[in-house]
Amino acid sequence: MTDTEQQFQIDENEAQLLTAMSIDDVGELPSYKAHAGKNLKKGEKPAKMYDIVEALKTVFDPEIPINIYDLGLIYKINQQDDGQLHIDMSLTAPGCPVAGILPQQVADAAAAVDGVGRVEVEVVWEPAWSIERLSDEARMMLEMI
């Protein structure tokens, strides 16, 4: 995929998510997916889950000074034997103003880990995110703010 094609794909994905955010009735929100990475070379070992999680912890919601992993926005990480990842994530709300960039940042962060192949990040709306999903570390950080 050329740089122009990739930018078009990102712009199209962002427009799709922004359309989803503008829907007042949260009934049927369209799905949103972000992609990054390349297939692993033959014989390359898949990354350890710990390293993937640590990479995800480098992505922050700019409105809340807590990383998206400790915020509880990462619902599921499925790693295949060939290093490919599928990540289900949510947002704090359908109208989240940074919703257009966070999924791609998550995909890019995961893809940067040695041993990670193609990455697909899908925004899911069920179950809805709630404050109960915060890690203990995130709760402590919020108390300090």
Image: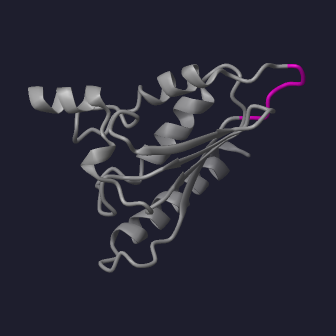
Residue 132, position as x, y percentages in the image:
28, 46
Is 110 located above or below residue 26 in the figure? above
Residue 89, position as x, y percentages in the image:
47, 49
Residue 62, position as x, y percentages in the image:
27, 38
Name the foreground residue: 70 vs 40.
70
115 within the magenta span:
no
Residue 95: quadrant of the picture = bottom left
Name the foreground residue: 52 vs 10.
52
Residue 141: quadrant of the picture = top left
**Quarter the C terminus occupies:** top left
- The answer to whether residue 122 is seen in the rendering is yes
Would you say the magenta stretch is mainly helix, strand or loop? Answer: loop
- The answer to whether residue 145 is seen in the rendering is no
Residue 1 left/right relative to 49: right
Residue extent of the magenta highlight? 38-43
Residue 122 left/right relative to 64: right
Measuring 41% from the left and 70% from the top, which residue is drawn there?
A: 20
Measuring 35% from the left and 67% from the top, which residue is drawn there?
A: 21
Measuring 66% from the left and 52% from the top, which residue is drawn there?
A: 5
39 within the magenta span:
yes
Residue 141 left/right relative to 79: left
